[in-house]
Amino acid sequence: MIKIKNISKKFLVKNSTVQALDNVSMEIEQNDCFAIVGESGSGKTTLANIILGIYNYDNGELWLDNNQLFSKRNLKLRKLIQFVQQNPMSTLNPKKTIFKTISLPLRIHKIVSNDKVVERVEKLLSYVGLDTEFMYRYPDTLSGGQKQRVAIARALASEPKILILDEPTSALDVIVQSKVLNLLLDIKEKLGLTYIFITHDLSVVKNIANKVLVMNKGKIDELGITKEVFSNPKSKYTKTLISAIPTVTDEEDEIKPKL
Amino acid sequence: MSEKLLKIKDLELSFKMYEGISYVLKKINLELSRGEKVALVGESGSGKSVTTKLILGLLNQKNVTKKGEIIFNNKNILNLPQKEFKKIRGNNISIIFQDPIAALNPVFKIKEQFYEVNLNKKYFTKKDSFQRAAKALEKVSIRDPERVLESYPFQLSGGLAQRVVITMAMINKPQLLLADEPSTALDVTIQNQALDLMHDLTKETNTAVLLITHNMGVVRKFAEKVYVIYRGVIVEEGTKDQIFSNPGHPYTKALLSSIPKLNSDQLPKFDESAPDYASIKKYVHS
């Protein structure tokens, strides 16, 4: 579905350059839950931003089915890839009601006619398990988990094929996190979506992703089927990363790779 | 006689707000011995951070009502005047905050920020202070302490800044270290380093640690005793083994089961009809 070929990206910082992405190639197939993991500064968010079209890439190619993607792209291509960000507290406009927030992409992408907007917003809210009474509330009256649900509903509004989730649950408490993750998986099943899931929580990756890409300093460190990467990590960096996961049971410790 | 270092007795806290009174802590009881590592676990809004603020005497706004006792070294410090508190803060009790870069003042060099802490121990000249700081940083395996001391906080990486903050908190050998989510802002590998460092330093000086966190994995790695707090009520207390292998309170059980496990391929499923955990009696392990 998404094909990335030898993409590189440099950033200019004062007098020096930072190689944020160095010759990254990968393929994401339909219905994948593709996880990108790595420490901060490893380039995972840069990669997501390039797929979204926020940055352009220096060299390489980025394909979505049969269209080559650049940072400048038309509405039709833009609506196919949507984004859920890390911190729900700061990604919702505090001055707009939930209805206005969710209906904006509906209007921009002309998903439904004007008289059907309310109906569609209600449907989107029901996808994420929120009552219709939330429509006319403001973000500051919502809890963190509810806000993240609204952010997901907004991302779903333009009927995308791909959702990029940038640490969607790291600002949430564990119990809420578990609920939101379960919700995301249900939605994926129901709507046949493809997920690109950026996180540094490897326990979450193990539980929801079918493929995982480990990034280190802008390079691909390891790429493969989640089960295989976790049971038999090849690179030293991946081993370190997996063995550093804080765990809560002895059974988990036993399956960690020995360093 | 094994004196308790810190004893919190029936601590209550409420904020008067526009909408009415908000009860944040409801009769909290908590104890720490010297050199003990205790974790206070709970979700956001459960009252764990305000507990540390009360211990440090940082909640003095007009709309705050406090009741109960915080006994530190046999002295109730809950309503101590600020002048007295100044002697305790940084000397006997110190704190590590969540985000090390944010905890440091961005417009002062690290050496200047160490100077302030060193003043407490009568290191009056800048040169003495610099040397003392450099020595301490060297001990936490920072290779070039001089460069770090001459840097501004934004010039340091997250892991390095956290080591600086931990060193700063420990330099006066406090009896009690409050660690408010000390590793949440860090990557897993650096998180482990920070926890190990805290462990080593506190062992050396026999400092007690009150670890505030919502990450059960961190608790398991670090703490000896655990208190679980939910909406201002302690719902369970016990040793680490008791809490992890035999949790008693339904909230603790829910908390532990909702964590994605490394040895499973599926997310834990959730019972949506959660009871009101706060109304269920506290579970004490015998």
Image: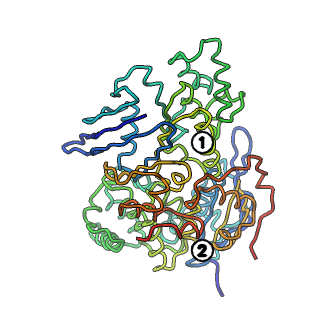
- What residue would you read off at disc 1? A185
- What residue sits right under mark 2 in the picture? B224
Furthest-bottom residue in this view: B1
Measured as percent of width and height from the top left, residue A18 is found at 25, 45
Q: Label 2 lies in what chain?
A: B
Q: Is residue A80 visible?
A: yes
Between the C-alphas of marks 2 and 1, the distance is: 36 Å
At x 53%, y 59%, the residue is B181
Which is closer to the viewer, label 2 or label 1? 1
Q: Nearer the viewer, residue B5 or A208?
A: A208
Viewer-nearest residue: B136 or B197:
B197
Which scheme is used to colour this image of the protein? Answer: rainbow
Residue A253 tag number: none
- Whether A130 is drawn above or below B4: the answer is above
Determine the residue located farthest toward the left in the rendered image: A15
Circle 1: element type: helix
Residue A214 rendering spot, x and y as whole percentages = 39, 52
Which chain is indicated by disc 1?
A: A
The x and y percentages for residue A257 are: 45, 67
Q: Quadrant of residue B34?
A: bottom right
Image position of B148 with respect to B65: above or below: below
Label 2 secondary element: loop
* Quarter occupied by residue B217: bottom right
- Mark 2, residues whose alpha carbon is within 10 Å: few (<14), some, or many (≥20)? some
Q: Amino acid at mark 1?
A: Leu
Q: Nearer the viewer, residue B182 or A254?
A: A254
Q: How many marks?
A: 2
Residue B236 coordinates in the image, percent (x, y): 72, 65
**Circle 1 crowding by C-alpha within 10 Å: few under 14, some 14–19, many from 20:** some
Q: Amino acid at mark 2?
A: Glu
Using the image, determine if residue B215 lies above or below residue B135. above
Q: Is residue B88 left or right of residue B143?
A: right
